[in-house]
């Protein structure tokens, strides 16, 4: 087994990142940080029969585009046992947040990205003709989002707020149900069959609820 540095990507103005989320099924990476920064990068694996050294040479240089990200370097892949690096084929800056972007989660089945910032604003982004566009916006205006996750089928999203509020919504934006916990929530996770939701509090307690 070999571990090596495949690629470095520069973030403009040395802005601090707070969330990085990888859609490993389709090659998208979302990066969110201070000052409303939200970038989506596209990774494409090189063909399996491509010579490593040729791919490394092809990748060298700068990738440009809207909100360009500089590729600072690639490790020479001529060493035996090294795999072929991925190509950074696209970078797009998404405008929709004014505060620091602190959470990001993918809906792989529906090809959607959901992000939230320090003010509790939630934005759902949708892929259309190779570009990402704002589809829905929601702000409860009472608390910051602690965690949010789509279920495996990509049909429902659960959102938990730091003040204990929980909201489950459908992929088309309709609210399905909500609940108020008398404790501060930190994390959530869907069960594999989407029938239950596991909540974790800041005190270290775990609570399981019926998702319906």
Image (spheres, helix red, strand yellow):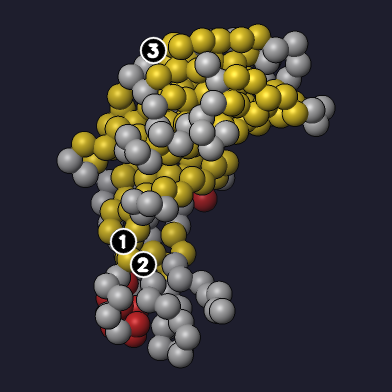
Residue 174 disc label? 3
Q: What is the spatial separation of the Cα atoms under label 2 and label 3, in whole angstroms?
A: 38 Å
**Relative image position of residue 176 (x, y in whole percent):** 46, 11
Q: For numbered disc 2, what is the local secondary structure?
A: strand
Q: What is the spatial separation of the Cα atoms under label 1 and label 2, in whole angstroms?
A: 6 Å
Give the mark nearest the N terminus, 1 or 3. Answer: 1
Q: Quadrant of the N terminus?
A: bottom right
Label 2 sits on residue:
86
Give the mark nearest the N terminus, 2 or 3. Answer: 2
On screen, residue 123 versus residue 195, left or right, reads left
Residue beneath the point at 54% across and 42% down: 19
Please report contact status of discs 1 and 3: CB closer than 8 Å, yes or no.
Answer: no
Eyeballing the image, is 9 above or below 137? below
Choose mark 2 or mark 3, whichever is in front.
3
Please report contact status of discs 1 and 2: CB closer than 8 Å, yes or no.
Answer: yes
Eyeballing the image, is 118 above or below 64? above
Eyeballing the image, is 114 above or below 41? above
Of residues 45 and 118, which is closer to you in this image? 45
Give the mark nearest the N terminus, 1 or 2. Answer: 1
Residue beneath the point at 38% across and 60% down: 70
Q: Residues within 10 Å of mark 3 (few under 14, many from 20)?
A: few
Q: For numbered disc 1, what is the local secondary structure?
A: strand
Is residue 68 in sight in this rendering? no
Label 1 sits on residue:
44
């Amino acid at each position: 087994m070999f571990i090596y540095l495949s690629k470095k990507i520069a973030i403009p103005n040395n802005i601090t990142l707070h969330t990085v989320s990888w859609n490993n099924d389709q090659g998208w990476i979302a990066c969110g940080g201070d000052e409303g920064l939200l970038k989506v990068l596209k990774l494409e694996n090189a063909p399996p029969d491509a010579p490593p050294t040729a791919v490394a040479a092809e990748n060298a240089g700068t990738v440009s585009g809207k909100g360009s990200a500089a590729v600072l370097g690639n490790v020479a892949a001529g060493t035996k046992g090294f795999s072929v690096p991925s190509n950074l084929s696209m970078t797009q800056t998404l405008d929709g947040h004014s505060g620091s972007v602190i959470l990001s989660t993918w809906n792989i089945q529906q090809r959607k990205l959901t992000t939230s910032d320090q003010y509790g604003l939630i934005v759902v982004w949708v892929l259309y003709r190779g570009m990402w566009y704002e589809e829905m916006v929601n702000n409860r205006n009472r608390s910051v989002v602690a965690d949010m996750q789509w279920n495996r089928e990509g049909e429902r999203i659960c959102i938990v707020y730091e003040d204990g509020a929980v909201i489950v919504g459908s992929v088309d934006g309709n609210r399905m149900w909500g609940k108020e916990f008398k404790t501060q929530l930190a994390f959530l996770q869907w069960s594999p069959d989407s029938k239950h939701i596991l909540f974790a509090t800041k005190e270290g307690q775990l609570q399981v609820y019926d998702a319906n």
